[in-house]
Image (cartoon, rainbow, N blue to C red):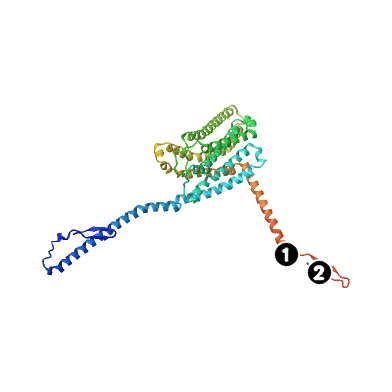
Amino acid sequence: MKVKHSTMGRYVQLEPLNSLHITMSDEASAPSMMTSVAATLTTAVMKSVSSTAASSSSSSSSSSSSSSPSSSSSGSSAGSEPSVNQKLFLVVSVALATVCFFTNVLQVAVFARPSAMRCVKGVLLLSQAVSGLVATFVVAFPIHVISSRGGSVVGPEGYAACYLGHSGVILLAGLTSLGTSTLLLLHQYLKSSDPRRFMTAGTNVAGWSVGVGAVWVVSIVVAVAPYAGWNTWQQHDARCHLSTLWPLSFTALLTFLVCGQVAVALLMWAATHATRLRTIGDGVHSVQRRSDGEEAPIASQTVGMHGIGGRSGVCVGGWCVSVGALVPLLAHVVMASSCAASSPCMANPGHYHEEAAALPWASLLLCAAGVTNPLLYVFTDDQVSSSTLLLLSRVCCWWCEGRKQRLVPRVQEPHDAETNVYVTHDTDHLVSDNT
């Protein structure tokens, strides 16, 4: 005989009752037989219930444990707070961008005047200030991504927004700053090495303006080239994590532009150093030939060399600042492009984005260079310092005059009452009437 019992949706099959070896020979053994059958049924039911509960609890715990990482990951990805690194980047970037913006706005106001643009140096410094203004917006896209708690925009449109908002601004600011610094260095080289040629070529404002325009045109073309199609966005359809997805050919062009300007600067430095050594040698020979008045040539040469070194040191310092801001960025670009072309990155695009967090910090150096270059010229160049102080004094006087015009009527309002004096015919005294 088989007994089926339903327990939590499952049927438990019991053993046949004849295996219990119970005999129905006499009536006295009937109660004991019923008691043993009831005990057997109770034991089987309890065992089945306990096994079913254990299996259900284990299955529910396994399902909850399997679903908990996904829920935690989805919750962390959906509403996670910015990390300590991101918060530190926000504080540093906002403070640096604010100082960079107001510093370069002041320099643009100084050199955008017609009187300042009549000289070559004013045109070059105006270009440097505008490049600093562009560098202010380098931190705009990282701040937007961190504040929105998500560093990804999916699809080609997302890549375009990421590139134009971050990488394109980085290229434009870096290339224009370096190109303008190289032109300033060339201008000072002509002035110190060949004064006769400088009188004609170094004072040609139109020619140097064309050079500045060429620097900006080339920088804009290079910055827009990946957006126009020179990119590898289709091969990396993952998310945009503030990284550059440039092919190796574009990275080679960018490296060539930067290294070419570095080579030109080194050639100018070598030529200037050779000219100084030759000048010192000629001065020593002339001093040896003269027996009288040997102190005057030495003094004049010392003063001349000190003046040349002081003026050229500012240009060299500004150029070194521009190059120093681009070196970490260029190193990151080379490493990122080589990783993007490697087989692990092709197989797993997320592998490339793991090392892309260094780009926002490297781009902050461009913003720092945008602050350093104007301050370097303001505190070391007498002409720039006087022009800046003159503009600041005019702005302060204008503000004080406007403040005075707003305050004077309020102070004089209680004293503006007119007094009319009448002389009556009946009496010879004055009567005042306040209106």
Q: Position of residue 266 (x, y in %)?
A: 52, 32
Secondary element type, mark 2 = strand
Q: Tell me, yes or no, if residue 386 can be seen here.
A: no
**Mark 1 burial class by Cα count in 10 Å: few <14, some 14-19, many 20+:** few
Residue lying farthest right?
Answer: 425
Q: Residue at x 45, y 49 (%)?
A: 85
Secondary element type, mark 1 = helix
Q: Give the residue type at disc 1.
A: Pro
Say how many tags the image has. Answer: 2
Viewer-side residue, 164 vs 235? 235
Q: Is residue 297 left or right of residue 39?
A: right
Residue linked to disc 2: 432
Q: Is residue 62 left or right of residue 148?
A: left
Q: Residue at x 65, y 37 (%)?
A: 119
Q: Is residue 36 left or right of residue 128?
A: left
Residue linked to disc 1: 414
Q: Give the residue type at disc 2.
A: Ser
Q: Position of residue 86 (x, y in %)?
A: 46, 50
Residue lying farthest bottom?
Answer: 426
